Amino acid sequence: MTQQNFEPKIVAFCCNWCSYAGADLAGTGRLKYPENIRIIRVPCSSRVEVPLVMRAFQNGADGVMVAGCHPGDCHYNTGNYHTRRRMILMQKVLDFMGISSDRLLVKWISGNEAAKFKDTVENFNERLKKLGAADKVRDMRCKK
Ligand code: FES
């Protein structure tokens, strides 16, 4: 596959209460966004722990997006504050491992922000196209 027609695989963890609703609204509103995204609904963005992100990369994702409610709007009060701290650390770990932290995106998208969801996915997709495939991460898989 050449760089030009490379379609990155994106795994998006979206919190049930806001970001997933935003993605759903984008779909029902017929807003077109890249099809190469796989959305995984989680109860809260704070459910997304470091091993979950690494597992997504190891299983073929070229980019991982973690989306949740805006700060102060988390339905579990402080969940997204934990997410924000955890993902900042995760980005540092990715950089330390030689994997660009640009492959991990954290966004706050509410249930009525369908256009923001669409724009976010499009921009992330373009960013990943420039970065190319995340082969280095896949090479980390345990070999039997
Ligand atoms: S419920 Fe949405 S981030 Fe916690």
Image: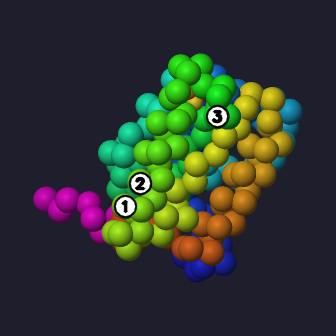
Answer yes or no: is residue 60 visible. no
Q: Residue at x 47, y 45 (%)?
A: 85
State whether residue 4 is above or below residue 32: below
User: Are discs 2 and 1 less than 8 Å apart at CB?
Assistant: yes
Q: Which residue is mark 3?
A: 71
Q: From mark 2 to mark 1, how far is it between C-alphas?
A: 5 Å
- Tell me the quarter of the picture where residue 3 sits: bottom right
- Tell me the quarter of the picture where residue 75 sits: top right
State whether residue 22 is above or below residue 55: above
Of marks 3 and 1, the one in the foreground: 3
- Give the amino acid type for the residue marked by disc 3 in the picture: Pro
Q: Which residue is mark 1?
A: 93
Q: Which residue is mark 2?
A: 90
**Left or right: where does residue 143 sit relative to residue 119?**
left
Is 110 within the magenta?
Answer: no
> Dot 2, how many residues are within 10 Å of its Cα: few (below 14), some (14-19), or many (20+)?
some
Q: Residue at x 35, y 69 (%)?
A: 96
Tell me the element at label 1.
helix
> Dot 3, how many residues are within 10 Å of its Cα: few (below 14), some (14-19), or many (20+)?
some
- Coordinates of residue 42 in the picture (x, y in percent): 51, 28
